[in-house]
């Protein structure tokens, strides 16, 4: 077993950290409070090559083919350097749940049209799966794609969609025949401006406020066959394929954020004096720091294991569920510990500690709630 | 091959309900016998047991509707 990284991987991670620290953290308190998404910062990330971590070189990608371990480590660095967890979620959502499926299942024309525009920052994309009546039970989705001359007619609604209000394109999942259940789920690339396709206004939310979330409505929306991604019924396979990429890389950025959070908390408790000594000398405080470190490192081991399994073409069902559960819950718990360790000022917005707590809650909900991860683990254990 | 798959489905996916009569022609999907997690588990089992890699685009209803269809698909995959 070898836990070391090739030098070019760590070198690039260092470059990503330096870029993120220098470019992405200004005015964050204000942007968070106002719930502002910055297309300018998005563009800077595209120019740096972040979006290219999830596309082949031919379409603006960083490497000839996507190297999951390389991208994961880079996105970990991104989460460490960039304090804007909303921006990080938005980028990761587009990269792993839209770009990767197109790179794998798309026709050459689709790759050329969409991937190039996504990696360059010209277009933004959303992944539209969840519906008001179908969340955890996603294959009971009600959005229908009725086959017609030259394409399909979509009717239905998607909600809780990251980037929906900003999206130029949506990767939408709809059922062509509800009797087939999951095998009827089919994916479509829907361009902004398509008649019958509407993005509803941004929903306000507790955290991740710098990335907009919203809903899409489809009313007799005609989508030509050439905009179908993969075959009829390929939706199940597409979702399954992108899920593990999604988990590795979205969570990698959260791991980076947890590392930054731990370092800042250690620096604070060393510096802050009460009763004539550093508060870090009080065991109640240092125990919390030890717990934060343990959560960070156990999450890291699971993350690297999932990425390694995927890179070696192995199934990572159990490990991905353990990872999602452990890492997302750890971020919530450690964010709370980071606040406690600051005392009262941890509660103030200007300290920039409470924002991580609000952001972390999103992670235990999206991409399968913690309850769902536990039930997957239990099922795989034969219960 | 079919017997190995049927045995796995009964033992692992149907919680050891060995007395269930599952024929190779039984519609696994329409009958709701196997849910989405079960299907992903079955896929992982098949890949490991028969030392094959099922490309994501082959995960279709035609290839996975029945145990017989899975068996035929695997035969084609191995000879391809
Ligand atoms: C910040 C954020 C970003 C998101 N981005 C996207 C996106 O880009 N695209 C997209 O399609 N969706 C997105 N979602 C939606 C997200 O995937 C869903 O919220 C999630 O899958 C849960 O579905 P639900 O909200 O309908 O909750 P429900 O499924 O209704 O669950 C409600 C509660 O019941 C529990 N529950 C449900 N079923 C079970 C079960 N079988 N066993 C045990 N407990 C169960 C859940 O754990 C939860 O506690 C996002 C959500 C958030 C918070």
Image: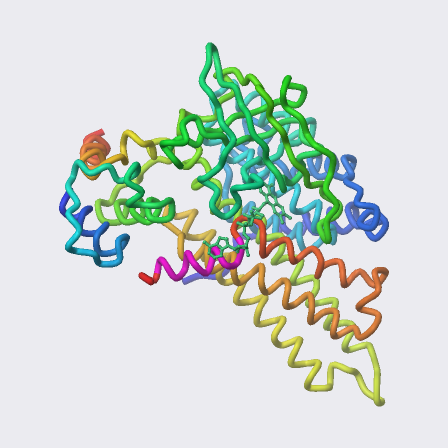
Residue A286 coordinates in the image, percent (x, y):
68, 81
Residue B71 coordinates in the image, percent (x, y):
19, 37
Q: Is residue B56 magenta?
A: no
Who is closer to the viewer here, A269 or A183? A183
Query: With A231 as the anchor, is A113 left or right in this view?
Result: right
* Image quarter hosting the C terminus of chain A: bottom left
Which color scheme is applied?
rainbow
* Image quarter hosting the N terminus of chain A: bottom left
Please say if A153 is above or below A124. Answer: above
Name the residue rendered at 48%, 15% in the picture. A151
Query: With A7 as the anchor, is A183 left or right in this view?
Result: left
Who is closer to the viewer here, A44 or A129? A129
Residue A375 coordinates in the image, percent (x, y):
43, 58
Please say if A153 is above or below A237. Answer: above
Please say if A153 is above or below A270. Answer: above
Who is closer to the viewer here, A129 or A100? A129
Report the number of numbered marks: 0
Please say if A272 is above or below A315. Answer: below
Q: Is residue A341 visible?
A: yes
Asked where in the image residue B57 lies, by quadrant, the reply is: top left
Asked where in the image residue A186 lies, by quadrant, the reply is: top left
Residue A131 coordinates in the image, percent (x, y):
56, 39
Name the residue rendered at 56%, 45% in the picture. A71
Q: Is residue A82 visible?
A: no
Asked where in the image residue A337 lies, by quadrant, the reply is: bottom right
Q: Main secondary structure of the magenta part?
A: helix
Name the residue rendered at 66%, 42% in the picture. A90
Residue closest to the far bottom: A275
Q: Which region is colored magenta?
A: A369-380
Name the residue rendered at 61%, 48% in the picture. A75
Query: With B61 as the anchor, is A192 left or right in this view?
Result: right
């Amino acid at each position: 077993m070898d836990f070391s990284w090739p030098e070019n991987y760590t070198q690039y991670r260092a470059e990503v950290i330096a870029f993120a620290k220098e470019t992405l953290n200004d005015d964050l308190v204000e942007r968070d409070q106002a719930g502002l998404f910055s297309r300018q910062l998005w563009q800077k990330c595209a120019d740096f090559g972040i979006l290219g971590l999830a596309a082949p070189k031919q379409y603006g990608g960083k490497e000839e083919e996507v190297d999951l371990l390389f991208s994961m480590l880079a996105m970990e660095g991104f989460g460490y350097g960039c304090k804007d967890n909303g921006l990080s979620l938005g980028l990761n959502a587009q990269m792993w749940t839209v770009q990767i499926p197109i790179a794998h299942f798309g026709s050459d024309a689709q790759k050329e049209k969409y991937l190039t525009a996504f990696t360059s920052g010209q277009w933004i994309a959303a992944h539209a799966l969840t519906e008001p009546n179908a969340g955890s039970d996603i294959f009971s989705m009600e959005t229908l794609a009725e086959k017609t001359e030259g394409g399909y007619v979509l009717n239905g609604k998607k909600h809780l969609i990251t980037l929906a209000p900003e999206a130029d394109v949506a990767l939408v999942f709809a059922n062509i025949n509800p009797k087939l259940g999951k095998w009827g789920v089919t994916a479509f690339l829907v361009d902004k401006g398509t008649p019958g396709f509407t993005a509803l206004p941004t929903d306000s939310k507790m955290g991740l406020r710098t990335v907009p979330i919203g809903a899409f409505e489809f009313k007799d929306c005609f989508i030509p066959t050439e905009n179908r991604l993969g075959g009829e019924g390929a939706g199940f396979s597409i979702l399954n394929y992108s899920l593990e990429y999604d988990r590795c890389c979205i969570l990698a950025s959260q791991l980076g954020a947890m590392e930054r959070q731990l370092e800042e908390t250690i620096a604070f408790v060393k510096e802050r004096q009460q009763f004539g000594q550093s508060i870090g000398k009080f065991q109640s405080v240092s125990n919390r720091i030890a717990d934060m470190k343990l959560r960070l490192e156990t999450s890291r081991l699971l993350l690297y294991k999932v990425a390694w399994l995927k890179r070696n073409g192995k199934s990572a069902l159990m490990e991905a569920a353990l990872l999602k559960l452990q890492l997302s819950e750890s971020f919530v718990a450690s964010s709370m510990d980071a606040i406690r360790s600051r005392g009262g000022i941890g509660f103030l917005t200007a300290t920039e500690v409470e924002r991580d707590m609000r952001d972390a809650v999103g992670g235990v909900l999206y991409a399968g709630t913690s309850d769902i991860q536990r039930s997957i683990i239990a099922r795989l254990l034969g219960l | 091959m079919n017997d190995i798959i049927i045995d796995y489905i009964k033992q692992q996916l149907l919680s050891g309900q060995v007395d269930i009569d599952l024929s190779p022609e039984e519609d696994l999907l329409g009958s709701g016998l196997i849910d989405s997690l079960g299907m992903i588990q079955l896929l992982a089992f098949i890949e490991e047991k028969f030392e094959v890699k099922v490309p994501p685009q082959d995960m279709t209803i035609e290839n996975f509707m029945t145990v017989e269809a899975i068996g035929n698909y695997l035969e084609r995959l191995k000879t391809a």
